[in-house]
Amino acid sequence: MVKRRLISTAAVALLTAGLAACGSSSTGSSGSPTAPAHVTLNVWLMSGSAPASLVTAWNQQFEQAHPNVTVNVSLQQWTGIVTKTDTALATTQAPDVLEMGNTYVASFAATGGLADLSSVSWPNQSTWLQSLQEAGTYNSKLYGIPYYAGDRIAIYNTNMFAKAGITSTPTTTTELLSDCAQIKATEPSGTSCIYIPGEYWYAMDSFLFGEPGNGTSAIATKSGGTWSAQFSSSADQTALNWIYTNLFQTGYDLAPATQNDTTTTTNTVFDSSKAAIIVEPGWDYASVYGTGTSFTASDVGSFALPGYTSSAPMPTFLGGSNLGVAEKSANKTLAEEYIQMVEGTQYQSEMATVGGVIPNSTTLLNLQAENPPLNTAAQAAKTSWFTPNSPQEATVENDSYYEDLLGAIFSGQQTASAAASTYDSQIDSVLNGS
């Protein structure tokens, strides 16, 4: 595909009007201009990803720039979306534009369902968040354009910190453990310092990627086309044993080791002052105070999960979505232009300020400077990690391999070494499609 230069929708509208004024429209046999054929651009967006007001605004702007186009947005539910998308992409009824959870892009690209977007010019491409760009890339080709991100931050009870005499938030794991010792000494038995369910791999695996000297994927690496899970590696073993010894055995983390995260449960524990710290997405911050809770905004604070050293916080899992174009779309150029508009600075800025999510560009991460929790999440996104970019990654996650591995270790059922030996081979098999 010829690389195109991005132009504004206003310019598109002027150009369209100018061409019409110059008589460049085609004519029928009677000599009168023939209007361009009407086109419906079908767009699948996930329910809850973008505020309805933004979707309406960018659809209207696109239709004004393309008078012969109607944008038809269909909101999809996450439950069952992989099967539904696979089925749609195999037919001519595929949506022109589709939103994908970032761990699903490789799977859809591997089946040939997505168009290669590598040759298209995208706004802010040089400053995209690294993990979102990696998620949208398969076999060195770009199939998913970063849409927005979300990550996990520490949310804490300011009153419990003050009661324990803690005057600043921890910036290293050493400080975190020291704070936990103080909290344990001042709170009733059965209170967690930091409440992270053992199977909650979105948070727990940050400790793996944060291990000093661990410069490769802590989940799996790829060599010669073959994936190899890394939980048995020295770095991962060190981190897994650190978590078990310093959080679970000490009683600083009293969350069920064999339970995955459920926001409702975690927030309930926090609201009942049974935990000083929880680790949740930044946009979840407001749900732990206000109506229906025992807290006001001043009772709650946030900080990035501290790293092993003072040089940087723990890398955070950067979840979120990418936008793609169906290979079988008959409207690829329009679909690309639609994504260019949504991905541009205007609407990415509004996704952050109105929608409360993390925008796709590092140049836009300061938009929430006056909103401490969202700013914490945005700044944490600068250092992130992502899952193996294998078409089978979704299967690994859906079949709960990560949860089962971590649950076995942190419940004390298996040593870190024994559990990793078992699950590395199983994860290898799935990632490699064998």
Image (cartoon, helix red, strand yellow):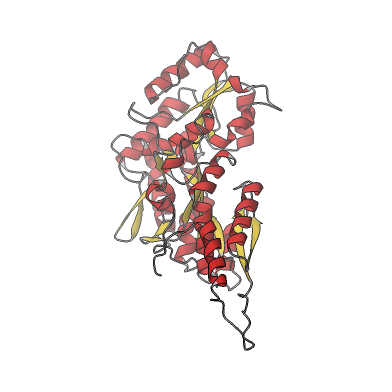
Judge whether 211 appears above or below 81 on screen.
Answer: above
Q: Nearer the viewer, residue 184 or 310?
A: 310
Q: Quadrant of residue 191?
A: top right
Is residue 250 something one can see in this rendering?
yes
* x then y, percent, for residue 423: 42, 48
Q: Quadrant of residue 67?
A: bottom right
| Quadrant (top left, top right, bottom left, bottom right) of the N terminus | bottom left
Is residue 279 something one can see in this rendering?
no
Q: Please name the residue shown 40% across and 33% down the image.
A: 314
Q: Please name the residue shown 47% across and 34% down the image.
A: 410
Q: Residue furthest right?
A: 292
Q: How many labels sit on residues?
A: 0
* x then y, percent, for residue 301: 54, 24
Q: Residue furthest front?
A: 22
* x then y, percent, for residue 329: 54, 70
Q: Residue furthest bottom?
A: 29
| Quadrant (top left, top right, bottom left, bottom right) of the C terminus | bottom left
Judge whether 239 appears above or below 91 on screen.
Answer: above
Q: Nearer the viewer, residue 203 or 376?
A: 376
Q: Nearer the viewer, residue 153 or 419?
A: 153
Q: Please name the residue shown 59% across and 20% down the image.
A: 298
